[in-house]
Amino acid sequence: MTQDEAKALVGKRAADMVEDGMRVGLGTGTTSVQFIKALGARVQAGLKIRCVASSDSSEELGRSLGMDVVSLEELPELDLYIDGADEVAPGLALIKGGGGALLREKIVSSAAKRFIVVVDESKIVPHLGKFPLPVEIVKMARPLVERRLTELGLNPVLRQKKDGSGPYLTDENNFILDCHAGEIIDPGAVAAEIRAIVGVVEHGLFLGRAEFAMIAGEDGVRELHG
């Protein structure tokens, strides 16, 4: 099974969890795209739901598939949030934000009664940190935040646009510093240290948020609970 096939499989399985009348949060990233496409097919077949998206791209995709995607102001409480992750460690500690939507992802997940992670087997790790940890920051604060993150040994690098035309900007028009931290032994302590820095908007450590993870591999989809 290829990675793309695994993402499609787990995306469809997650879409099958959605029930008529639910208020659903749409994640961001390649696995979430597969979930949204599978959910869109169910909507086209008659499923009635309302959705809030965690990024402009997911909102556009959902609407293109005929889904009723509204703002969090219109739908402040959600039944279910489905999203991928860049890394999943024991205890369902997550790194998210590789797609640049960590702030909105954390907001939408916080509005949901249940947050379920959908990943392929390659995202399961013994410790977080091999994937760079994203930190979203206010533009003005870049010198201050970079210096403090460096002092913490997190090795921040300003994220650039894929076309090389300049710094990447989030949907909220902020910068992202990708921290090449290495193995993160105590994610809770690292999260607290980052949040204490003036100018940090949000970080990509999602701790104690997910109910369980759905993991696609050669043997199909299995569940990982905290």
Image: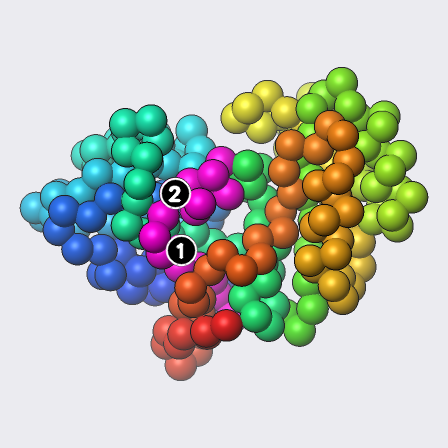
Q: Which mark is residue 150?
A: none
- From the image, state whether disc 2 or disc 1 is nearer to you: 2
Residue at x 40% of width, y 74% of height: 223
What kind of element bears circle 2? loop
Type of the residue with mark 2: Ala
Q: Read off the residue under disc 2.
A: 111
Q: CA distance from mark 2 to mark 1?
A: 9 Å
Q: Quadrant of the N terminus?
A: bottom left
Q: How is the protein colored in the picture?
A: rainbow
Q: Which residues are magenta?
A: 104-122
Q: Residues within 10 Å of mark 2 (few under 14, many from 20)?
A: some
Q: Read off the residue under disc 1.
A: 115
Please indicate whether residue 128 sits to the left or right of residue 23 in the image: right
Q: Position of residue 82 (x, y in %)?
A: 37, 52
The residue most toward the top is 140
The residue most toward the left is 46
Answer whether residue 116 is magenta in the image: yes
